[in-house]
Image (cartoon, helix red, strand yellow):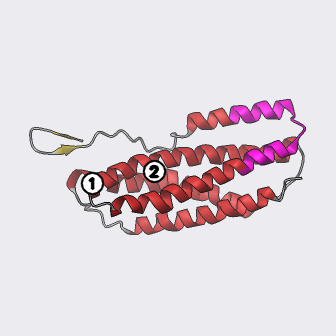
């Protein structure tokens, strides 16, 4: 944040919210999937264990950030609303990056299990729902929340009346967490 001579506050936009933010880590995971696909690894449990690890890392990240960090920081008497929102922008950008990378890895594991190992597993609907909620989160919800956050950082309050968007976000996070837990139970049932 900087001040110009006219007394206006300018925010350095160092958190690029766009749908391409997860491209590089996802390409890395897709490359690893291609490697395993071509190597035809015989032990299916390795892929299942990787999928379980990715799934529960995702659940842990979601619980730690969305359900703890977000509201705990505002309870501190020394954290102003502007500082809390500014930190939140950074934290949720990082969470989205991690979530997109873990989701890509999880989808790649499911592709390996279905195509390479020919297990013909029926992917649970919770897998689809978590991916759909994540896409809506990254493409629509987070950019709108980011605009609101930038207003709060610059002016101390938001002119936007889109308070409902926070409730949509919380509902989406609850759906995501429930779906991730269901995915974890499904994946643990695949261990031989």
Quarter of image, res 26: top right
- On the image, the x and y values in percent for residue 82 come to 27, 54
Determine if residue 174 is in view: yes
Q: Is residue 34 magenta?
A: yes
- Observer-nearest of 137 and 192: 192
For the view shown, which residue lies furthest in the left direction? 6
Query: Which element type, helix, strand or loop, lies under badge 1?
Result: helix
Few, some or many residues within 10 Å of mark 1 (<14, 14–19, 20+): some
Q: Is residue 108 magenta?
A: no
**Which residue occupies 29% across, 51% down?**
83
- On the image, the x and y values in percent for residue 173 come to 54, 62
Query: Which element type, helix, strand or loop, lies under badge 2?
Result: helix
**Mark 2 lies on residue:** 92
For marks 1 and 2, the one nearer the N-term is: 1
- Observer-nearest of 43 and 37: 43
**Which residue occupies 85% across, 53% down?**
191
Q: Disc 1 versus disc 2: distance between alpha carbons?
A: 15 Å
- Extent of the magenta region: 30-52
Residue 38 higher or lower than 108, as above or below = above
- On the image, the x and y values in percent for residue 40 come to 87, 34
Residue 8 higher or lower than 184, as above or below = above
Quarter of image, res 71: bottom left
- Main secondary structure along the magenta-highlighted residues: helix
- On the image, the x and y values in percent for residue 118 come to 90, 46
> Which mark, residue 82?
1
**Which residue occupies 73% across, 43% down?**
108
**Image side of residue 100 versus residue 1, left or right:** right
Determine if residue 123 is in view: no
**Image side of residue 13 versus residue 41, left or right:** left
- Observer-nearest of 142 and 81: 81
Few, some or many residues within 10 Å of mark 2 (<14, 14–19, 20+): some
């Amino acid at each position: 944040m900087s001040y110009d001579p006219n007394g206006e506050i300018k925010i350095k936009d160092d958190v690029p919210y766009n749908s391409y933010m997860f491209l590089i880590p996802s390409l890395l995971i897709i490359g690893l999937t291609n490697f395993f696909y071509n190597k035809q690894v015989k032990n299916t449990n390795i892929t299942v264990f990787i999928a379980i690890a990715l799934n529960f890392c995702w659940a842990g990240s979601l619980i730690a950030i969305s359900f703890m960090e977000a509201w705990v920081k505002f309870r501190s008497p020394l954290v102003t609303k502007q500082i809390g929102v500014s930190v939140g922008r950074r934290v949720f950008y990082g969470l989205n990056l991690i979530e997109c990378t873990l989701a890509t890895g999880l989808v790649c594991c499911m592709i390996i299990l279905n195509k390479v190992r020919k297990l013909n597993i029926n992917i649970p609907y919770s897998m689809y729902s978590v991916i759909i909620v994540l896409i809506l989160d990254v493409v629509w919800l987070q950019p709108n929340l980011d605009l609101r956050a930038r207003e709060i950082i610059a002016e101390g309050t938001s002119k936007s009346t889109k308070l409902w968007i926070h409730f949509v976000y919380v509902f989406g996070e609850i759906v995501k967490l429930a779906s991730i837990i269901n995915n974890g139970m499904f994946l643990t049932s695949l261990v031989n």
